[in-house]
Image (spheres, rainbow, N blue to C red):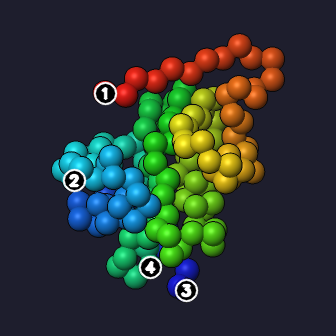
């Protein structure tokens, strides 16, 4: 398997975004390809992983970039998972925001994902010591 190349300052095409998001089962994003493309385009930072011309991974953050950033999406095509691509994407997308106090993400309740993020310095909100924190969401 070829090692992916990471690129920044690139917004992938609509069709390749849909293909990547579908490959990991994120169908809620792919129902409206134009909306997906617009959302990625409005991100604070996007990092892509490519093998040749093929998009095999993507990470993006949203936020103000000063006091808070949200890791909105990080995904790697199944054929390229467990090879360090996700780790490289995470490091690259957050690199400019090392001094931002709040780096936040919301993810599925999957033990593998918890292990991935904890190994990279994230703490589940309920496990933050000496903090009375709550998180609220509203899906529409």
Residue depicted at 61% across the width and 55% down the height: 91
Q: Circle 1 sits in a helix, a strand or a loop, which is it?
A: loop
Asked whether disc 4 touches disc 3, contact meaning CB atoms under 8 Å apart, the reply is yes
Query: Alpha carbon of mark 4 to alpha carbon of mark 2: how far?
Result: 23 Å
In the image, 3: left or right of 117? Answer: left
Looking at the rendered image, the quarter that the N terminus falls into is bottom right
Label annotation for residue 51: 4
Upstream in the sequence, badge 2 or badge 3? 3
Asked whether disc 1 touches disc 3, contact meaning CB atoms under 8 Å apart, the reply is no
Asked whether disc 4 touches disc 1, contact meaning CB atoms under 8 Å apart, the reply is no
Residue depicted at 31% across the width and 27% down the height: 140
Q: Circle 2 sits in a helix, a strand or a loop, which is it?
A: helix
* Image position, residue 75 (x, y; %): 48, 58
Upstream in the sequence, badge 4 or badge 1? 4
User: Residue at the right extreme?
Assistant: 130
Q: Residues within 10 Å of mark 3 (few under 14, many from 20)?
A: few
Upstream in the sequence, badge 4 or badge 2? 2
Which corner quadrant of the image does residue 39 belong to?
Answer: top left
- Which-is-in-front pick, marks 1 and 3? 1
Residue depicted at 73% across the width and 45% down the height: 118
* Image position, residue 78 (x, y; %): 50, 70
In the picture of the structure, the residue carrying the numbered disc 1 is 140
- Closer to the camera, 85 or 43? 85
Query: Alpha carbon of mark 4 to alpha carbon of mark 3: how far?
Result: 9 Å
- Which-is-in-front pick, marks 4 and 2? 2
In the picture of the structure, the residue carrying the numbered disc 2 is 33
Upstream in the sequence, badge 1 or badge 3? 3
């Amino acid at each position: 398997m070829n090692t992916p190349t990471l690129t920044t300052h690139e917004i992938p095409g609509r069709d390749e975004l849909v293909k990547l998001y579908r490959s990991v089962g994120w169908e809620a994003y792919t129902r409206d390809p134009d909306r997906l493309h617009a959302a990625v385009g409005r991100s604070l930072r996007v990092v892509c992983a490519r093998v040749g011309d093929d998009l095999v991974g993507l990470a993006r953050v949203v936020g103000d970039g000063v006091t808070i950033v949200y890791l909105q999406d990080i995904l790697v095509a199944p054929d390229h998972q467990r090879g360090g691509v996700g780790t490289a994407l995470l490091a690259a997308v957050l690199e400019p925001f090392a001094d931002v106090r709040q780096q936040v993400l919301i993810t599925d309740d999957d033990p593998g994902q918890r292990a991935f993020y904890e190994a990279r310095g994230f703490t589940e909100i309920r496990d933050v010591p000496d903090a009375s924190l709550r998180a609220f969401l509203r899906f529409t």
